[in-house]
Protein backbone atom coordinates (compact mmCIF):
# COMPACT_ATOMS: atom_id res chain seq x y z
CA UNK A 1 0.00 0.00 0.00
CA UNK A 2 1.45 3.34 -1.00
CA UNK A 3 1.62 6.22 1.42
CA UNK A 4 0.48 9.56 0.03
CA UNK A 5 3.21 12.18 -0.17
CA UNK A 6 2.85 15.93 0.09
CA UNK A 7 4.99 18.35 -1.88
CA UNK A 8 5.03 22.13 -1.86
CA UNK A 9 5.36 24.08 -5.10
CA UNK A 10 6.07 27.80 -4.93
CA UNK A 11 5.72 29.39 -8.37
CA UNK A 12 6.58 33.03 -8.87
CA UNK A 13 3.67 35.46 -8.56
CA UNK A 14 3.16 35.87 -12.33
CA UNK A 15 2.96 32.12 -12.94
CA UNK A 16 0.74 31.63 -9.89
CA UNK A 17 -1.69 34.30 -11.15
CA UNK A 18 -1.84 32.78 -14.65
CA UNK A 19 -2.24 29.29 -13.23
CA UNK A 20 -5.05 30.34 -10.91
CA UNK A 21 -6.83 32.28 -13.69
CA UNK A 22 -6.55 29.36 -16.11
CA UNK A 23 -7.80 26.86 -13.55
CA UNK A 24 -10.72 29.12 -12.61
CA UNK A 25 -11.68 29.56 -16.28
CA UNK A 26 -11.98 25.80 -16.62
CA UNK A 27 -13.80 25.32 -13.32
CA UNK A 28 -10.88 23.54 -11.67
CA UNK A 29 -8.80 24.19 -8.60
CA UNK A 30 -5.21 25.23 -9.10
CA UNK A 31 -4.17 22.17 -7.04
CA UNK A 32 -5.75 19.85 -9.61
CA UNK A 33 -4.10 21.67 -12.50
CA UNK A 34 -0.69 21.50 -10.82
CA UNK A 35 -1.13 17.82 -9.96
CA UNK A 36 -2.10 17.05 -13.57
CA UNK A 37 0.91 18.96 -14.92
CA UNK A 38 3.31 17.17 -12.59
CA UNK A 39 1.76 13.78 -13.45
CA UNK A 40 2.10 14.49 -17.19
CA UNK A 41 5.74 15.51 -16.84
CA UNK A 42 6.54 12.42 -14.75
CA UNK A 43 4.87 10.21 -17.37
CA UNK A 44 6.97 11.82 -20.11
CA UNK A 45 10.14 11.38 -18.04
CA UNK A 46 9.32 7.71 -17.44
CA UNK A 47 8.67 7.09 -21.14
CA UNK A 48 11.93 8.83 -22.02
CA UNK A 49 13.83 6.63 -19.57
CA UNK A 50 12.25 3.47 -21.03
CA UNK A 51 13.23 4.55 -24.55
CA UNK A 52 16.81 5.22 -23.45
CA UNK A 53 17.01 1.79 -21.81
CA UNK A 54 15.66 0.12 -24.96
CA UNK A 55 18.17 1.96 -27.15
CA UNK A 56 20.98 0.85 -24.85
CA UNK A 57 19.76 -2.76 -25.06
CA UNK A 58 19.61 -2.59 -28.86
CA UNK A 59 23.12 -1.10 -28.99
CA UNK A 60 24.46 -3.85 -26.74
CA UNK A 61 22.81 -6.56 -28.84
CA UNK A 62 24.14 -5.06 -32.07
CA UNK A 63 27.65 -5.02 -30.61
CA UNK A 64 27.28 -8.67 -29.59
CA UNK A 65 26.03 -9.57 -33.07
CA UNK A 66 28.89 -7.69 -34.73
CA UNK A 67 31.40 -9.48 -32.52
CA UNK A 68 29.83 -12.85 -33.34
CA UNK A 69 29.89 -12.20 -37.09
CA UNK A 70 33.46 -10.94 -36.83
CA UNK A 71 34.55 -14.11 -35.04
CA UNK A 72 32.61 -16.33 -37.44
CA UNK A 73 34.18 -14.78 -40.53
CA UNK A 74 37.69 -14.54 -39.15
CA UNK A 75 40.29 -17.00 -40.35
CA UNK A 76 42.14 -18.10 -43.44
CA UNK A 77 39.30 -19.12 -45.73
CA UNK A 78 36.11 -17.43 -46.79
CA UNK A 79 33.29 -18.29 -44.41
CA UNK A 80 29.92 -19.48 -45.65
CA UNK A 81 27.59 -16.89 -44.19
CA UNK A 82 24.41 -18.65 -45.32
CA UNK A 83 23.96 -20.16 -41.86
CA UNK A 84 24.40 -16.84 -40.05
CA UNK A 85 21.82 -14.63 -41.71
CA UNK A 86 18.77 -15.38 -43.80
CA UNK A 87 18.74 -11.95 -45.46
CA UNK A 88 20.55 -11.47 -48.71
CA UNK A 89 20.40 -15.13 -49.69
CA UNK A 90 20.48 -15.77 -53.37
CA UNK A 91 17.57 -17.82 -54.72
CA UNK A 92 18.60 -21.35 -55.65
Image (cartoon, rainbow, N blue to C red):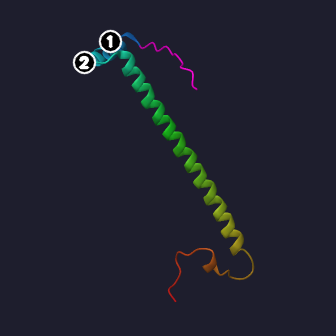
Image coordinates of residue 90 in percent, x first then y, are 52, 84
Which SS type dominates the magenta stretch?
A: loop
Left or right of 14 in this view: 85: right
| Quarter occupied by residue 11 | top left
Residue visible at 63% across and 54% down in the picture: 60
Q: Is residue 63 above or below residue 9?
A: below
Which mark, by number, is residue 75?
none
Q: Identify the magenta region.
A: 1-11
Q: Is residue 53 above or below residue 20?
A: below
Left or right of 32 in this view: 89: right
Q: Is residue 46 above or below residue 23?
A: below
Residue visible at 64% across and 64% down in the picture: 66
Whether the residues at callouts 1 and 2 have beta carbons within 8 Å, the answer is: no
Quarter of the image containing the N terminus? top right
Q: Which residue is mark 2?
A: 25
Q: Is residue 65 magenta?
A: no
Circle 2 SS class: helix
Mark 1 or 2, closer to the camera? 2
Q: Is residue 9 magenta?
A: yes
Which mark, by number, is residue 17?
1
Q: Is residue 5 above or below residue 73?
A: above
Image coordinates of residue 73 in percent, x first then y, are 69, 75
Q: Residue furthest right?
A: 76
Q: Residue furthest left?
A: 25
Image coordinates of residue 80 in percent, x first then y, are 65, 81
Residue visible at 40% across and 12% down in the picture: 12
Compare marks 1 and 2 and give the one earlier in the sequence: 1
Residue visible at 50% across and 86% down in the picture: 91
Circle 1 SS class: helix
Amino acid sequence: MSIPQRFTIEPDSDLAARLTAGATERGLSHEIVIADCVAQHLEIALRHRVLVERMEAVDANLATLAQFVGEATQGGGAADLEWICRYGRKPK
